[in-house]
Every structure is written in structure tokens, then in C-alpha cells.
Amino acid sequence: MPDITVKNVQFYFPGNVEALHAVDLHLPPVPTAIVGENGAGKTTFAKLLKRLLKPSQGKILLNGGPIDRLSTTQIAAHIGLVFQNPDHQIFKNRVRDEVMFGPLQIGLSKKKAYEAASQALKRVGLAESSEENPYDLALSERKLVGVASILAMDTDVIILDEPTIGQDERGKQLITSVVRELSEEGKLVLCILHDMNLVADMCERTIVFHHGRVFLDGETNWVFSHEEVLNQAAIEPPQVMQVARQLGIKHAVTEQALLNELAKLKIKC
Amino acid sequence: MSIIQVENLKYQYPSAEHLALNNLTFTINQGEFIGIAGANKAGKTSLCMALCGLIPHFFKGAYGGNVLVNDKPVRDTPLNNLTDLTGLVLDHPFTQLSGAKNTVFGEIAFGLENKGVPRKLMLERIEEVLHLLHISELRNKHPFTLSGGEMQRVAIASALALKPDILLLDEPTSQLDAARTTEVFRMLANLADQGTTLIIAEYNIEKMALHCHRILLLNTGSAIDFNTPRWVFSRPDLNEHGIVPPLITRLAKSLHIKRDDGLYPVETREFNALGGFVDA
């Protein structure tokens, strides 16, 4: 089972600008949301896990071993990162080639890479776009090309940086079901998200970043119950919890629970 | 007073097989805050492009019908004249930022410089939008070193600084955190109150329901409805158009809580008043 341990990691951008401060985390294969205001350090953290950036201090362990002892190819075979901006990820001029690139780099044969790419594209609903130029696709579709590229590599760890940017309801449902399936397969899925409704839907654990520090970390419902702390980190609880609070109803985390409570109140009226 | 008139607008991208915009006809009044809702490929971005003139001046293809902005036909008006009237925030800030400036301050100044705005006024406007979007502390940073959400706020600030009569925003809050999203919607509502016409294409139905005066519902390039949020989100066939109504409307539908006019509420206060759940 995949497992990441982050030990006292600090990261400074050039000019001694601190982006992350003393981050200590253990990440077992539980669907986990990473949330926080813009500039809180979420994307920097994801890049450190993927070793696109190196910690200024501290250590990151993958399955108990230091990640800095692994080659780029070994890291690529274990950890997949879907970039926040798909245009930073995509560079081939055919969707299929883009999705095959990763599998080929980690040593799959051309035939297996082709099959993996076909399956991944089907999973994100882009099977019919496989011969197109990614830059002829909409932003939401380019984002799904990025997701497919990582799915095709079948890594143990998948980090999705704001996967729902530009996605409509159908796209959000698709991402949600992909995350659930990956988690059921025993993979470690980390999602950087701003949509707290999706966090509540998809993730068992939520880690809140604030000014480069881990501000709150725990089971998702427990995290959302700390409203005052979340306010400081510019996080709004999911819509259901906000509406429940406005209507004076406690402990309604899901829409169905809220509906049940309201139905009881309506009968009393 | 109408500021935008769209008459039988049809548009097809070069090499595309289907119309991106199919026979749209509607009018928008000055100071209205309009939300465009629809699934991917509904035509939201294409409509924004057609209203600011990038269609047909930049994106060629088959174009029919008329778009009048301030009584000027978009097709016959040079793009640089249209940019005096309309501003556009693209769905992807990375595409919008010029890449020609090394600081956020310079990036916001870029449009103003190109418009020949006097220096003193330019400085005032830059300070104003830096403050409005809470990005004053980013002024000396390179735009491409910012986070996605910070970049998105710089893109909005750059468009706002030009003070267009009509501001078109294509998914302007997709990368913003919740607090910033709320701030941006409130700021836009204030701008509409002051007379700026706002047209926003968004997936954030909750915020559109609270702030927009009317919702234009699109499906594969056609206008399905153009009415108040209550009206549009009360439609029984909304799911068929790829839209899930706001939470309050979903709850009201399930509990059969309706207004006298048969429409469902879209915001908590009205829902509560109709349902009598909490003492006001």
C-alpha cells in the first residue's frame, strides 16, 4: 500500500520567501483533500511530493524510503501529478501521443502504452478525441487529457491539482467517480480543491494549509465542524452545512440529512 | 435602456461541423448583471467572444445575424473601437496575461498604456483595482510566478482598470478560494449597481442565483431560457441542460415549498420565510 511521510519540510522560493513551514504529515492511502486560500502553499506542496521542487529543509519518504534516492523515472512510476494548468503539462500535438508519453517513459512497451492510453481516455470520456490536437480541445477537456495521462501510468500515488477547473456538472461527477475508483483500488489520492462540496463528497481526510503551514488536519466532517478556524484560512464549509447553520439545524452534513431535518420541521409547522 | 442587442446570431468556427451559436436573439440593459449557464460546449465562451467582437474579427468562420453594442454593429466596428466599450476576462488567466510585463503593476498598466490613458489617471486606476482585488501586496511580483488564483485576480484587475461599460467574464472564479469568490461576486454586484453591465459565464450556480439579475440558459449553442434566477432554476427540465439548481431550490422542490407565483426560492432567507423553519 502506498504511503508518504513528510518530515519537517520547509521550502523557500528565491529571495528567501518562505512558502512552506515545518510541514509534518503522514499520508496513507485515504482519499485526502488539500485545501486553503490562494497562495497557501498547496501547489508547492504537491510539487515537493513529486520532487519537481526539492525541500529547503526536511525529508519526504515514499513507502518508508527517502524520495531523494529515487531516480526521476522511479518517482514517475510511483507518483503522478495532474498539473493545475493543463497547458504546463501537455506538449504533444496528438491527444493519444500525450497520454502514451508517460507510460513509454516508465518502460511500458508501445503496445501496452497504447492500450493504457486507450483505457485512460475512455475512462475520462475522451476516447473519440484521441487523434485530435490537445490545443483544439476546450480547457476542461485539456484538463481531462492531463488526468488521463496520469491514469495511463497506473501510479500508486495520484495528486490532482484542482482537477475540476472548468468542469461542468458532468465533468465534476466524472472526476468524483474516478477518485472513488482509484481509492477503492488502494491508491493514495490527494486532491487540491477549492470546491468544498466536492471535498465533502470525495475525501475522507482534509488537510487545511494556511500561510504555508498545516492549519487543520483530520477527518473531513471534523474539519468542517471547525468553522471559526476555517474562516481564518478563508475556507467556507460545504453549501449544505452553511444552509443548515442558517436554518438553525445542527449536524446535517449531507443534503439528504438536511432534507430529513427540514421535513421533520415542516410536519411540526 | 438596452446596451446589447443580439438578433438571430449564428456562428460556426472554421472547420467545425456544428454551429457554436444557433440563432440567438436577446437584449441586455445597461447595469444588468447577467449570468450565462450551460454545460461544456453550450456556447458560453463563444457568446462572450461574439459580444466583445473577437468573433468575427479574430475568430473567422461562418457568421450570421447581428450583434449591436451601444447601437454599434459589432461586425462593422473595428476591434479597437469595441475595446473602448467592452472588457473581457478569459477563462484561463495564463492565456490572458500579456507576458510582456515583469510585474503585476506593469501588467495592469499594460492595457491602460495601450489605450493612452494619462499617467495620473492610470496610477489612480491601478491602485483602485489592486485594492479592489486585494492584490496590492503582489504588485512587484512577476505575474507568472503567482498561484492560479492570484493570476486570476490579476486578470480581472487588468480588465477592470480599463473601466469598460460592459464587462464580460468567462469563469472568472474557477481558481479562486471561497472567500475570494464571494468577494469577487459582491464586487461585481456593486459595479452593476453603479451602472456597469456585467455578463458572467460560470459554473458557480449558487453565486449566480444570489447575484445575477437574469440567467441566460444555453444548450449546444441555443438559448433555452433567459429570465430571473428563480424562473430559470425552477425549470423541471434543468438537468437535461446539464445544470443542477442551487441547493435551496433543490430543497424547496423536494419539500414542495413554492412562492405564490409557482416559482421556487433560490436563496435561504426567502426559503425560510416560505417554510417558516426559523423565527426571523
Image (tube, coloured by chain):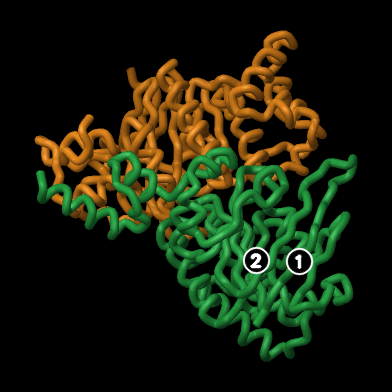
Crowding at mark 1 (Cα within 10 Å: few <14, some 14-19, many 20+): many
Sequence-first disc among 2 and 1: 1
Of the chain colours in the picture, the one used for chain A is: green
Give the quadrant of residue A90.
Answer: bottom right
The residue located at (41%, 62%) in the rendering is: A170
Give the quadrant of residue B274.
Answer: top left
* Residue A50 - label: 1
* Residue A6 - label: none
Which of these two is toward me, A147 or A261?
A261
| Rendered location of residue A86, percent (x, y) | 65, 58
* Residue A159 - label: 2
Q: Is residue B32 left or right of residue A63?
A: left
Please state, as top left, top right, bottom left or bottom right, where the N terminus of chain A lies in the image. Answer: bottom right
The residue located at (45%, 42%) in the rendering is: B201
| Rendered location of residue A55, percent (x, y) | 84, 58
The three-letter code of the residue at mark 2 reads Ile
Task: Please state the chain letter of the residue tagged with numbered disc 1 in the rendered image.
Answer: A
- Chain colored orange: B
